[in-house]
Amino acid sequence: MIFLKKLLKGEKRTVAQTISVVENEGDTKILENIFKYTGKAYHIGITGPPGAGKSTLVNAIAKQLLEKNKKIGIIAVDPTSPFSGGALLGDRVRMTDLALKENVFIRSMASRGSLGGLAQKTKDVALVLDASGMDYILIETIGVGQVELDIAQVCDTTVVALVPESGDSIQAMKAGLLEIADVIVVNKGDREGCDSLIMELKFALDLRQQKAGWHYPIVKTIATEGVGIEELVATIQSHKEYLKRSGRFEKDRKEKLKLHIHELIEEKIKSHLKEFVIKDDELEKIINRVYERKLNPYHIADEITNKIFKVREDV
Amino acid sequence: MGKKIRVLVGKPGLDGHDRGAKVVAAALRDAGMEVIYTGLHQTCESIVEAAVQEDVDVIGLSILSGAHMTIFSKVLNLLKKRHATQILVIGGGIIPLEDMKKLEKMGVGKLFGPGTPTTEIVDWINECAFAKTEQPKTKRVKAKKSRKIKVRRKRKK
Ligand SMILES: Nc1nc2c(ncn2[C@@H]2O[C@H](COP(=O)(O)OP(=O)(O)OP(=O)(O)O)[C@@H](O)[C@H]2O)c(=O)[nH]1
Ligand SMILES: [Mg+2]
């Protein structure tokens, strides 16, 4: 298979086209074929509120890793407009330093209705990059508010970027951001308010139960000037070493695989449900009877669920 | 989920006005397309590289500096080198009619003068991508070919 050879060698056009297939088509054939070549790339997630400097940080981190001769895949997710279904993907604007680097591959993704801060297919796209021989995969989420925490389910190390403008530490705590953070960055260190934010964060993190052996580091950066980036990369590296040393790396990855399989099953059941179980006209009839209060939704749900599993036994 | 039309909007060269490019980018987004915006001062090399990595269907360049002849031919050549000639190249800006004709002969899909309503650009892209997206997915390659033919026919008119 010439295509597979090219993909594994990281030929950029092949990688790009494979990503498109994975992103657009329900077909999982390609993923089945490449899965055995994945698992080598280390996944780093960058999340945080809109405008915190995530893309600028990704750019700076990638530059550092390039100096160590690493191959880097970048997935940058921006939101899809719920109104038009279109998207303006602008993260590349901050990554122009990387545009022509042989060892960097950047792909912008639209979230396409997914609510977790990533696109539904981000995990699959990361698999393609993994198979293409990347050492590191950096994943930037959309600017998150209070619920978009999928990133931690995909990455080995999750970096949460905060800035003084994005509110105080209580807001970061409410958003659940501190719970998913392995490393915290206070970016825009050139702005006022950074040091007091760091103080507050330290206090908030003291309240958080420590995972054995890992204290949650806070790194101050000025991403636009590259200040603090060396320390940030070293911190990520030491988190990686901690994971490996403590056995958590393997444990976490197995946990993520389990979750992935659950998600896939869920998806299959959902599409099965739509296709075979409830026909529109049938549902219409049921709805009418529910509306008249002759049936109730709870009973109907039970009945249909039972039917699904019967259907599954039949095939 | 289905395929979305992906368009790279870039601003090559030295002039610092990207208002037009941004207006077009927003219009394409509002028409349901995924627009990769690469920002100001891009080289032809970085535009083509980004287009390849992002696997876009269309590259839209905004050029106000007067360097349109060099820039477009360079972009087309680079695409050839990357075996990515299925990517349509279109442009906008202040381009004399004479040059427009030359460029379209060279292989630029379409050029839009200043003040072109954005709906016209949207319609044009939709029409060109139509053949591709309407085909069954297993026939992608064929679909791409038929799109090309369509574009070529347009050019002859
Ligand atoms: N002063 C200052 N500005 C910064 C710093 N880092 C990033 N910026 C600026 O902040 C703005 C937003 O940066 P991005 O990197 O695009 O932020 P982002 O978090 O990726 O934004 P979204 O993807 O839109 O959520 C840009 O204008 C950057 O130049 C910094 O350390 N100091
Ligand atoms: Mg960004």
Image (tube, rainbow, N blue to C red):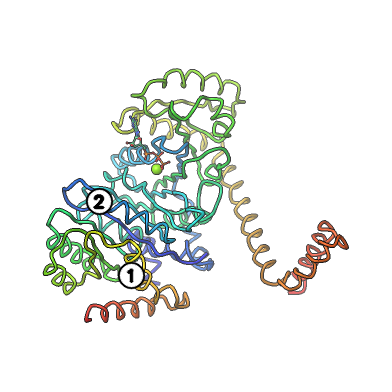
Name the residue nearer the viewer: A40 or A206: A206
Please name the residue that numbered disc 2 is placed on. Answer: A100
Residue A220 location, quadrant: top left
Name the residue nearer the viewer: A301 or A157: A301
| SS at circle 2 | loop
- Amino acid type shown at disc 1: Trp
Q: Residue at x 54, y 66 (%)?
A: A26
Q: Position of residue A112 (x, y in %)?
A: 50, 56
Q: Residue at x 26, y 44 (%)?
A: A97
Q: CA distance from mark 2 to mark 1?
A: 30 Å
Number of marks drawn: 2
Residue A234 location, quadrant: top left
Q: Residue at x 46, y 56 (%)?
A: A125
Determine whether, in the image, residue B29 is placed left or right of residue A204: left
Q: Position of residue A189 (x, y in %)?
A: 36, 25
How many C-alpha atoms fall within 10 Å of the one at disc 2: few (<14), some, or many (≥20)? Answer: some
Mark carried by residue A150: none
User: Looking at the picture, do discs 2 and 1 lie on one chain?
Assistant: no
Q: Position of residue B80 (x, y in %)?
A: 22, 68
- Amino acid type shown at disc 2: Leu
Please name the residue that numbered disc 1 is placed on. Answer: B124
Q: Chain of mark 2?
A: A
